[in-house]
Image: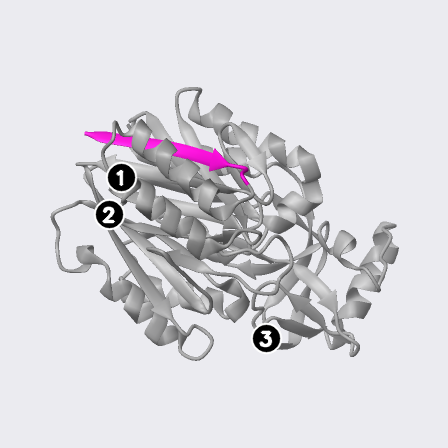
Amino acid sequence: MKKTSTVHTSLPDSRAAGEQLGRGLIESFGGEAPSAVVVFASSKHHHKKLLQAIQDTCQPKAMIGSSSAGEFTQTSFEEGTACAIGFRSDDMRFSPGIGRNLRHDRTAAAQAIVNSFQGMSSQAYPHRSALIMTDALAGHADDFVEQITLLTGGSYKLFGGGAGDDAHFRKTDVFIGTEAVPDAAVSLEILSRNPIGVGVCHGWEPTGSPMRVTEARGMRLISMNNIPSRDIFLRHASTTGQAFDIANPLPFFLHNVIGIATDSGFRLRVPLAIDTDGSIQCAADIPEGATVHIMKPQKLSALAATQSALAQLEGQKPEVAMFFDCVATRLRMGREFGFELKAVQDALGENARFAGCNTYGQIASADGQFNGFHNCTAVVCVFPQ
């Protein structure tokens, strides 16, 4: 037996919003408590009040999630709201986990997450996946995801993203139970008797010649080809005929991101701001010595990501999905981001549901996929009927 439910609320009061989400979940499960609930909520909400209201109303056995930068389900897309997806299943086993103090010891945080995985010591379920939500503002998210992959021997499909705060980039929280925690990552291990699909696609292509990152410090890109990064982008704007306001560079950056060349494709990084020394602050780490391109948007990515996830279901029909896409994609597309949501629904079919949020970076790690921590990338996880 498996049931799922997606719910959304635009109520501004956090307690009332949590109660509405909780009621919607428990009613869809015929008065029974959910096995697991995943919550995404705007930074406008008082997260502890929201989570406590959900807990009081529907008593989920496990609950995780994060603050976000745009929340959606198959029937809604708004900012400043909250949504949730609930599971009640005999076919899947859920275990929550948390790793704290990411800034100071991401190795210990990754180990704490993996220690919560029941599938590391049991082979009772053939399919192992985990939703990971992290405070990307703590930095080094790429290395954190890589450490989880190494600690699990690559035996888990990972999906999720970085918590958001409505594009303010100041403070983000991840949720476990009724706690809202900064500087941490949370997980929901999903052990399943049936296959779960994870698809990823960014829909960008390189433009111009490749460059070498000659100096970088974490998320600060100082120079490429021994030229200040600001000057590289100024030159690119001039060559391509684009407006580039140094005092307000984000509109330009949303259409011109950085692609790190890897053996399996490009891993994207979004530039955010320019420092006085000509370096550029990015949304995630860029390794020194990497080969990079300036990238341009080429196609909708959600459709390809969903199709890839569906292909992994071994012929079973989809029931519900989680969808994560970058806040930079939403800011670039505006209300046209609705086309991405429609593409997910069209690919899933009219009888399936989905819920998700805009994140600060996306996590995807699965067989045959472009793995790791990404920016400007669509990630879709599909659960079969």
Mark 1, Cα crowd under 10 Å, few <14 / some 14-19 / many 20+, is many
* Residue sitting at x 40%, y 57%: 175
Q: Nearer the viewer, residue 253 or 322?
A: 322
The magenta stretch spans which residues?
A: 1-11
Gap between marks 2 and 1 measured at Cα = 6 Å
Q: Which residue lies under the disc numbered 3?
A: 288
Residue extending farthest top: 350
Q: Are the residues flagged by discs 2 and 1 in contact, CB closer than 8 Å?
A: yes
Residue 344 coordinates in the image, percent (x, y):
50, 31
Secondary structure beneath disc 2?
A: loop
Q: Which residue lies under the disc numbered 1?
A: 34
Q: What residue type is labelled 2?
A: Lys
Gap between marks 2 and 3 measured at Cα = 44 Å
Residue 343, by quadrant, is: top right
Q: Nearer the viewer, residue 41 or 147?
A: 41
Residue 291 coordinates in the image, percent (x, y):
61, 66
Residue 355, by quadrant, is: top left
Which quadrant would the C terminus be assigned to in this image? top left
Q: Which residue lies under the disc numbered 2?
A: 61
* Residue sitting at x 51%, y 70%: 138
Q: Any magenta on residue 274?
A: no
* Residue sitting at x 46%, y 41%: 16
* Residue sitting at x 51%, y 63%: 136
Q: Are the residues flagged by discs 2 and 3 in contact, CB closer than 8 Å?
A: no
Gap between marks 1 and 3 measured at Cα = 46 Å
Residue 280, by quadrant, is: bottom right
Sooner in the amino-acid sequence: mark 1 or mark 3: 1
